[in-house]
Image: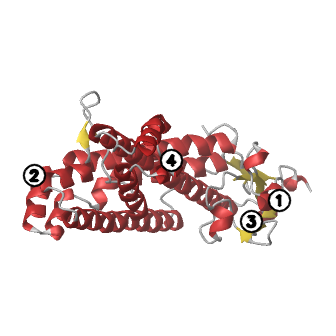
């Protein structure tokens, strides 16, 4: 049975959440399997490369995330073809077009995209780990403490490791290092961090007022909370990016398969939709709501930028980062009656 029609923004949100959970599951698996003692021993020897290897970063580690990208791609293609009418055959019968994820074009895009994404994530993680461990050694942090700061400490309630920098981008790990220093110094700069836990603001304000350092256990709790929030931010950002890419690309592939099956190319196209909360929609996107284009035609933003779909990776950052618009496929059901 083809998927029933539904709102594409809700559909994107559903896969956004699934991808977010899959990314966090991948990171948690790496943290759980990381060889803590081997990491600490390598740090003690000054063997950063050995410590990085002991973390266990490889493509298989991110299989939960990789698998969910594939599932989102297939679901998007199925949903798209769910609105495409059956194709009339020469014998008068009508054929329903089903999405074929094993189509060579679909398989090539999926393999290339997900493979490239996972490699990028892993390479950034390795860079981040090397930098984190080198900084720890420079600051005289003990090997085991440095290893725990990397993979996180076990939360006795959940049984999971939390508060490590593993999973963060290199930039986010640097934010953590800067925040730790600001907290240690009782600096007012710590109050300007968007990812801070505001429940600790009073401790910073008290330190500024009295000149006394924030208690060590409070500092540790503040930094761990910041790390956890940074990881959630990372998961949300990458999940939205991948949901947009996978589902919008699956629309392209589904429409291509429909046209190969006999659907008139002039009867299909796309409509740009903006998020309902207009106060947060980019000015250059606000006027695009309802803009229609044909297959293979780009949308044009208010700034004159051409985008194939919201979040198009070929677009400039100012037009795609944190974009919450979506593209809706359309079919002219009367086209065959002309």
Q: Residue at x 59, y 55 (%)?
A: 244
- Label 2, label 4: how far apart the Cα atoms are: 36 Å
Cα distance between the residues tagged 4 and 3 = 49 Å
Label 1 secondary element:
strand
Query: Is 133 situated left or right of 176 in this image?
Result: left
Q: How far apart are the alpha carbons under marks 2 and 1?
A: 58 Å
Instruction: Compute the Cα span from label 4 to label 1.
Output: 45 Å
Q: Earlier in the sequence, mark 4 or mark 3?
A: 4
Question: Horizontal and vertical percent for residue 75?
Answer: 55, 47
Mark 4 sits on what residue? 191
* Residue 299 on image: x %, y %: 77, 66
* Front one among 139 and 319: 139
- First in residue order: circle 2 vs circle 1: 2
- Find numbered disc 2 in the image and state the secondary structure of the residue it sits on: helix
Labelled disc at residue 37:
2
> What number is the disc on residue 240?
none
Q: In what element is the residue under mark 4?
A: helix
Residue at mark 1: 292
Alpha carbons under labels 1 and 3: distance apart:
10 Å
Q: Nearer the viewer, mark 4 or mark 1?
A: 4
Is any part of residue 194 visible from this angle?
A: no
- Left or right: where does residue 319 sit relative to residue 41? right
Point out residue 182 in the picture as x, y percentages from the top left corner: 40, 54
* Callout in the foreground (3, 2): 2
Identify the residue under disc 3. Answer: 295
Q: CA distance from mark 3 to mark 2?
A: 55 Å
Residue 7: x and y, percent? 70, 40
- As rendered, which of 327 and 47 lies closer to the eye? 47
């Amino acid at each position: 049975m083809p998927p029933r029609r539904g709102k594409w923004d809700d559909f994107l949100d559903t896969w956004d959440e699934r991808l977010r959970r899959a990314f966090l599951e991948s990171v948690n698996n790496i943290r759980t399997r990381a060889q803590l003692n081997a990491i600490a021993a390598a740090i003690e020897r000054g063997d950063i490369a050995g410590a990085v290897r002991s973390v266990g970063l490889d493509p298989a580690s991110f299989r939960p995330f990789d698998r969910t990208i594939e599932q989102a791609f297939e679901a998007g293609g199925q949903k798209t073809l769910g609105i495409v009418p059956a194709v009339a055959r020469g014998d008068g019968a009508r054929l329903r077009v089903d999405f074929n994820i094993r189509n060579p074009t679909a398989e090539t895009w999926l393999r290339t995209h997900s493979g490239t994404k996972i490699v990028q994530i892993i390479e950034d993680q390795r860079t981040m780990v090397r930098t984190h461990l080198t900084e720890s050694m420079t600051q005289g942090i003990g090997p085991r403490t440095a290893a725990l700061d990397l993979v996180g400490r076990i939360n006795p309630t959940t049984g999971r490791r939390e508060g490590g920098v593993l999973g963060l981008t290199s930039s986010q790990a640097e934010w953590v290092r800067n925040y730790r220093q600001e907290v240690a110094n009782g600096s007012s700069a710590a109050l300007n961090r968007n990812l801070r836990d505001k429940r600790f603001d009073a401790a910073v304000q008290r330190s500024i007022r009295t000149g006394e350092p924030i208690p060590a256990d409070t500092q540790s709790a503040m930094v761990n909370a910041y790390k956890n929030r940074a990881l959630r931010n990372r998961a949300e950002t990458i999940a939205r990016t991948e949901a947009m890419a996978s589902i919008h690309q699956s629309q392209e592939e589904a429409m291509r398969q429909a046209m190969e099956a006999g659907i008139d190319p002039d009867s299909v196209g796309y409509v740009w939709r903006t998020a309902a909360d207009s106060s947060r929609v980019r000015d250059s996107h606000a006027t695009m709501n309802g803009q229609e284009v044909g297959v293979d035609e780009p949308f044009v933003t208010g700034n004159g930028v051409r985008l194939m779909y919201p979040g198009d990776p070929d677009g400039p950052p100012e037009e795609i980062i944190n974009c919450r618009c979506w593209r809706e496929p359309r079919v002219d059901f009367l086209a065959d009656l002309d």
